[in-house]
Image (cartoon, helix red, strand yellow):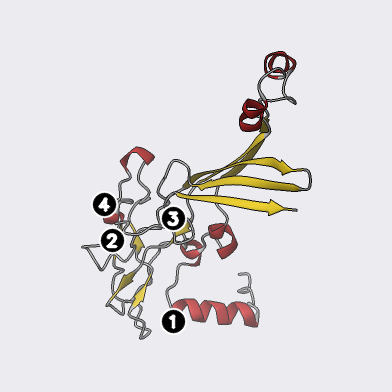
Amino acid sequence: MSPAPRRSFTERVFRAVVRLFPFDFRADYGRDLEQTLREQHREAQRERSAASFGRLWLDVARDVLTTAPRVVDFALGGWQANWIAIMESGQYFTPSFSGADTSNTNTTSGRPDRVRDGNLPTGERTLERWFDTTAFAVPKPGTYGNTAQYALEGPGLHVHNLTVSKNFKAHERMNFTFMSAVQNVFNHPTFSTPAANISSPGTVGVISSTRSYLGARTIELRIRLQF
């Protein structure tokens, strides 16, 4: 009969902790904080075009507009446009429960048990039901919840910003620049993550706010005088 293998002190302590606190380390292992703050997919595009319909445009336009009256070239020539588009998938978040000390550790909140995935298909997500709330349950007495951190995906982002500008020569030593800046051109809402506490059945899974740093469409008109 072969002797029983001798375990190291660290392994014996680890096994004792597991017996005292039946914690599922494998189930608990989820995305770390850096992963959840970094979206799955993010794309930013920037386009710049010089819409100079006057004396500096293409050869075809040059033939037509170089003989145009000075006032026409003054109004149509030299415009520039800058377009920035930002598109990204949603950030991750973690469901929770409250009001019960299921782990017997004087902690009345934590992560729930996960019955199934919980993330709804894209076509089924609404502001009133962003994820499947029935996929999570309060853990049984004497146990921790098995839901991993950041198991759910929140709303994505789709924003377009546009800036149009033109330099005008008012005098030999005086120029002024006109600029129009439009943020969130299509007025697309940027929603926050939904409420995720399954112990609040009236609000769990519901999105009730937008991201504070990305609001509704705004238009700014600016004029700068140089002399």
Secondary structure at badge 1 equals helix
Badge 1 crowding class, 10 Å Cα cut-off, few under 14, some 14 to 19, many 20 or more, is: few
Q: Position of residue 47 (x, y in %)?
A: 65, 36
| Amino acid under disc 4 | Glu
Look at discs 2 and 4 and give the one toward the viewer.
4
Mark sitting earlier along the chain (3/1): 1
**Residue at 44% of width from left, 55% of height from top?**
215
**CA distance separating discs 1 and 4:** 40 Å
Say which residue label 3 marks: 215
**CA distance separating discs 3 and 1:** 49 Å
Say which residue label 2 marks: 204
Q: Are marks 2 and 4 in contact (CB under 8 Å)?
A: no
Query: In the rendered image of this protein, does residue 178 appear above or below residue 23?
Result: above
State the residue in front, 95 or 83: 83
Q: Residue furthest bottom?
A: 106
Badge 2 crowding class, 10 Å Cα cut-off, few under 14, some 14 to 19, many 20 or more, is: many
